[in-house]
Image: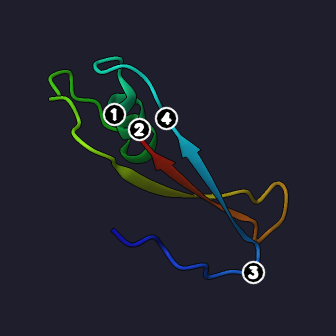
């Protein structure tokens, strides 16, 4: 999976790692945050998954963006 390239000078990248027991809702939390969706009947995620979301923060700086990479 490829992540969006840094388009602006003010794009900062952060990596977040979620760890926990099977069946606690890590995939559901990430799906809600990145896609704004929820599925009540998900199968257990096998292996490692990556998601990325770019956040724009105009209150801090007009061109400020954060690339949040979530690994679980």
**Could you tell me if the residues under marks 3 and 1 are in contact, i.e. CB atoms within 8 Å?**
no
Q: Which residue sits at x=57%, y=44%?
A: 16
Structural distance between the alpha carbons of marks 4 and 1: 9 Å
Label 2 packing within 10 angstroms: few (<14), some (14-19), many (20+): many
Marker count (numbered): 4
Pick the front one: 26 or 38: 26
Residue 27 bears which disc, if any?
1
Q: Which-is-in-front pick, marks 4 and 1?
A: 4
Residue 5 image position (x, y, % from top left): 53, 79
Q: Quadrant of the C terminus?
A: top left
Q: Which residue sits at x=85%, y=57%?
A: 60
Quickly name the residue at label 3. Answer: 9
Quickly name the residue at label 2. Answer: 30
**Could you tell me if the residues under marks 1 and 2 are in contact, i.e. CB atoms within 8 Å?**
yes
Mark 3 residue element: loop
Mark 1 residue element: helix
Structural distance between the alpha carbons of marks 2 and 3: 27 Å
Q: Is residue 44 above or below residue 23?
A: below
**Could you tell me if the residues under marks 2 and 3 are in contact, i.e. CB atoms within 8 Å?**
no
**Could you tell me if the residues under marks 2 and 4 are in contact, i.e. CB atoms within 8 Å?**
yes
Upstream in the sequence, badge 4 or badge 3?
3
Structural distance between the alpha carbons of marks 2 and 4: 9 Å
């Amino acid at each position: 999976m490829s992540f969006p390239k840094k388009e602006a000078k003010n794009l900062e990248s952060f990596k977040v790692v979620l760890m926990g027991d099977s069946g606690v809702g890590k995939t559901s939390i990430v799906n809600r945050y990145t896609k704004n969706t929820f599925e009540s009947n998900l199968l257990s995620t096998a292996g490692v998954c990556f998601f990325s979301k770019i956040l724009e923060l105009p209150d801090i700086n007009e061109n400020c963006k954060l690339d949040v990479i979530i690994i679980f």
